[in-house]
Image (spheres, rainbow, N blue to C red):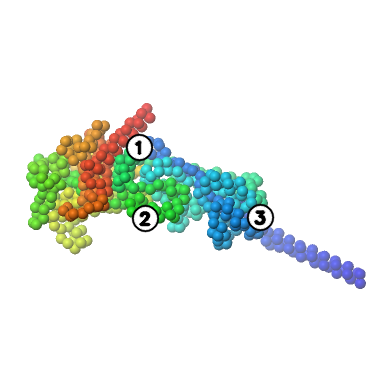
Amino acid sequence: MGQKKFNLGVYIVISLIMLLLLRLWDLQILEGDKYRKLSEENRLRMIKTPAARGIIYDRNGYPLVQNKPFFSVSLLLDKNKPVNIKELSRLVGIDPSNLEQRIQKHDSPFVPIRLKQGLTFAEVAYIEARRSDFPGLYIETEISREYLYGKTAAHVVGYLGKINPHQLDDNNFRGLPSDAFVGQWGMERLFDNELRGQAGERVVEVNAVGRQLRLIKDIAPLVGSDLRLSIDINVQKAAEEAFGDKSGALIALNPKSGEILSMVSLPSFDPNQFSRGITQKEWNSIIHDRKKPMLNRAIQSQYPPGSIFKIITAIAALEEGIIDPLTKINCTGGLNYGRWTFGCWKKGGHGSVDMHRAIVESCDVYFYEVGRRLGIEKIYKYAVLFGLGKETGVDMPPLKEKKGLIPTADWKKERLKLPWYLGDTFISAIGQGFITMTPLQAAMMIATFANGGYIYKPTFMVGKQEPIQKINLKPETINIISSALAGAVNEPNGTAFNSRSSVVKIAGKTGTAQVVAKGRRVSGEHLKDHAWFVAYAPFENPEIAVAVFVEHGGGGGAVAAPIAKRVIEAYFDSRNIEIVKRE
């Protein structure tokens, strides 16, 4: 009996040993890779090392941005260790119910939960001092931006933001973490690949409470390339300050290269809001702002150009030979056509004027008559030659620039089902009616005239480029009109005489674009005329061409011209500083 019990005991022990061996064989052989992987994942932690983003500079080497760390706190769940929701919520500053809901919805033990982002240094220190109570809790560091000039040049420089769902399928962003910072606007977006660099990776061994024991592998990040823009930040600041609280746009170009020295769109926005992780409340405030700060008025808004368009009408008249520059036309304050009267801005009239005086004093009646002799098709021909009615080709992602409109009789018939009247030609000749252009197109127009007819693609990059087109203008056409544009600023009866400069000789043309028809009794700031001014300097050898548009600003000579003067003088001040710096 005793022997039987002994044998039974032996069998049981052997069976247990066999079961244990089978289990060990199962763990080591059949499922060895699985548990080895789990062990490694618990022991090893891969940490992405963010790459420093390239710095954006202005043309003179002044940095417009700087990199700054962006901290987030994440939690890697351990299903065998329940989370103390109450204590964790207190530590990271998250509502307990929200935290619990996010943890319950999370279904991967190997993908961390991003709990909170945009942490301050104080928050990082506080969490680091207490995170030993939560082994899966750790701080992640990314690279974000600080925009040194805030709202100044925001539409040009752009901003960084988290990858959006549409970009996840874009090859340009393949391989990046789903919450990485990328360029979303302006130059930050256009040159994102070059500026971004390449993240590194560190593999570290950690203990049970998540503390680092040793470094296993370290792949250094590749720093992004720096970027030098054509804009002059001193000119940009002067331009935005000159607008005060007015809305509008300004573009300053180098007429010999197409380099954009300044692009202003006001009101603007603060890109730092985006780089630190914009809240839904902040975003709603921006997009519902009636002044539309995200609208780039320089390329996305199109307006009647008013009298700055008389430059095109004058060029067409001289090139086509339909009027002698010395021929005089009598202005009595208006022109009668059937039962309509087309008035001049000067009620008493200008008297007998030739082309020089008509441009200097911006006589409407003179240009009504010139328009009548030209006809709309010839006006259209020269407007299109100067790039109006089509895109300039400027790169400003994600925005698409407007084309503006130069009408013809066929356009009106097709679009409005109406014939073209002579009255349409009258008002087109002075830049009213159906004609519209963007401020950038206006800048291109005056820059092309200033350089003798060469059209360059507008660019934010420094460097000479070849013109994309040459307009063959007669030398006498250029001389006659340029002399009149200089007179508009420097002669006592010129419409921009109050904006003449003691620093440099400026040539230019004012414009006032009607928002409502003359004679209508209306009131309200939003119904005031728009103010325009286009100019270049120095008169003898132009280095800068400027277009200023002030939304509902009133008269071009009183409002827009002083802004252009200040910008032109700031450009020469800035250039002189740079010359001294180089010497």
| Disc 2 target residue | 288
Residue 418 in the image: above or below residue 400: below
Instruction: Give the spatial CA distance, label 2 vs label 1.
Output: 31 Å
Question: Crowding near pointer 2: few (<14 within 10 Å), some, many (20+)?
Answer: few
Q: Nearer the viewer, mark 1 or mark 3?
A: 1
Q: Residue at x 87, y 68 (%)?
A: 7
The percent coordinates of residue 125 (x first, y second) are 57, 45
The percent coordinates of residue 432 (x first, y second) are 19, 51
Q: Residue at x 43, y 46 (%)?
A: 272
The percent coordinates of residue 256 (x first, y second) are 28, 39
Q: Quadrant of the N terminus?
A: bottom right
Asked whether the beta carbons under mark 3 and mark 2 sit within 8 Å of each other, the answer is no
Dot 1 or dot 3, earlier in sequence: 3
Image check: 239 left or right of 127?
A: left
Q: Residue at x 23, y 46 (%)?
A: 554
Dot 3 or dot 2, earlier in sequence: 3
